[in-house]
Amino acid sequence: MRVIAITAFLVARQTQAALQVDLNSPDSIKGAASLVASDLLTYYHGSEPGQTPGILPGPPPAGDYYWWESGALWGTLMDYWHYTGDSTYNDLITSSMLFHTGPPLNAYMPENYTISMGNDDQGFWGLSAMLAAEIGFPDPPDDQPQWLQLAQAVFNTQVDPGRHDTVCGGGLRWQIPMSNIGYDYKNSISNGIFFNLGARLARYTGNETYAHHARKTWDWMMAIGLMTPDGDVYDGAHTGVNCTDVFKAQFSYNAAIFLQGAAFMYSFTTGEEQALWQHRVQTLLDRTAAFFFRIGPIIELSCETPATILCKTDMLSFKGYTHRWMASTAQLAPFTRDTIMRVLRNSTTAAINSCKGPLHSGRACGFRWTMGGYDGLTGAGQEMNVLAALSSLLVDFQGDDDKNTRKGAPLTGETGGTSKGDPHAGTGKGADDPTHLTREMTRGDRVGAWFLTVFTLGTIVAAFVLMGTGRFEDREGMAAAVEKKNREKEMEMEMKKKELSIWYKIAREVVLRHQG
């Protein structure tokens, strides 16, 4: 009887301590979001002596988190400020975003991370800078890079032919340095961020050139088979086989980054083209809702099952980005609002129920929202997910304006945006800078740069090659393991053969590179 009584007491205490939210009350949502934001920042130690400002602990093996996720963290907290009005963390957000700009180009390529950088890594910081401009986040001091300028710098470095090569008919590679495992992989998130930034810059500035590149990226994704007419968005493909080996793992943020970008294109265009983008938005939304929210809460089906979690640290944060980008879509494309807010509300209800872990005064949030409780998986990504879910619901409590869009919809330079831009940002024009990107990088440039890097930084490169291998496993191998479990035997055997071929090729390349 005593054991039963103690157990009942502990259960009651956990229930009482769990996150309490009334989703019909914006004040209740804001209060819960405030608690989760505070809990989230317990994972941040960048303000402590000896720590690097602006980043979560990492990258591995120094800590759990890669550099890009910190860029996503500040974007999540910007949205929190935008929806709640709580400016508690604004100074921290600004100082962190500015600390990692990477002068002199100020294109989010700081020296400490360039050797291991992917286009998606850089892109996530660019997305947060773009968001700051669109929501009227307080501008940096005049002597510092401005939000719009930073987003333009990221876009300009990625549109340069040195990044946007013709292998597979175009598209960005996952990794930027030739030395990295993943340089031979063209993936959806890198190209999705580029598409997304292009659409947003077009809408904010009115410059058609950005929209042109967004359209090209969309068409390339469709042509290569990374995106289908039915709205599936697959992970990536390898350049060595001309991108014919499409890896069909599906992650929610891949779908959502294109969904939001398509909504920006819908908002930017008119007439027949707007009707086309409306169709594309609807197709992506229907498929995203059916695939990732099939039973209510969002599920990362390529690495998450009720029995097994093969999601690595990166993947544990994807749900929050999807919630945020879908909420933004509802603002930009009003015809999606009812569906999106219904889907997000159901998912958020489940997210709240996961916040019953022993940390954070008994409200630590878990990852699997389908379990009806805490699953034992705690971290910054999980807290970001729930914070994003809560904040995004506040879109539903904002009224309509005279343009039949939701109040709080992203600003432009003509609708109240104050951030100053520079169309040449990130190009190095006018600067005595050997890393400027004002001309097309040739194959000889790349090879020369590779040998120089190996000669001067061999040990460091080797370390990052190992790190890159780990990230390749995180984003592809772990997802493949779950996918194989869910496929029929014939497809399972085909995938195994494909993986063996990939890993043989990777191992061979690593050996050849080190021999060179």
Image (cartoon, rainbow, N blue to C red):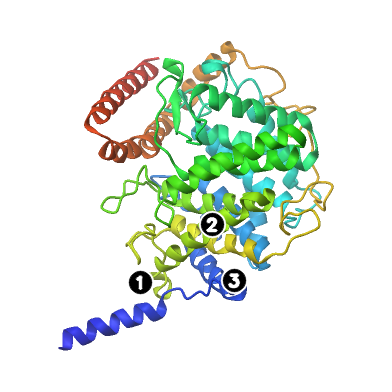
Count of marks placed on residues? 3
Separation (CA) of disc 1 from disc 3: 22 Å
Residue lying at 41% horizontally and 33% vertically, measured from the top left = 468
Residue 125 is marked as none
Vertical side of 443 occupied by 487: above or below? below
Looking at the picture, tell me which residue is in the foreground, 131 or 342: 342
Separation (CA) of disc 2 from disc 1: 24 Å
Q: Residue furthest left?
A: 1
Q: Earlier in the sequence, mark 2 or mark 1?
A: 2
Tell which tag, 3 or 2, sits nearer the viewer: 3
Snapshot quadrant of residue 30: bottom right
Q: Give how far across and how far down residue 271 sits, in percent.
A: 77, 35
Is residue 485 visible to the viewer in this orientation of the structure? Answer: yes
Looking at the picture, tell me which residue is in the foreground, 515 or 153: 153
Snapshot quadrant of residue 61: top left
Looking at the picture, tell me which residue is in the foreground, 74 or 261: 261
Residue lying at 42% horizontally and 16% vertically, measured from the top left = 240
Mark 2 Cα-neighbour bin, 10 Å: few <14, some 14–19, many ≥20: some
Check if mark 1's residue and mark 3's residue have beta carbons within 8 Å: no
Mark 3 Cα-neighbour bin, 10 Å: few <14, some 14–19, many ≥20: many
Residue type at the position of mark 2: Gly
Q: Is residue 59 left or right of residue 23?
A: left
Q: Earlier in the sequence, mark 1 or mark 3?
A: 3
Dot 3: element: helix
Residue 358 is marked as 1
Vertical side of 264 occupied by 178: above or below? above
Residue type at the position of mark 3: Lys
Q: Is residue 91 left or right of residue 350?
A: right
Residue underneath mark 2: 46
Residue underneath mark 3: 30
Q: Give how far across and how far down residue 369 sits, in percent.
A: 39, 59
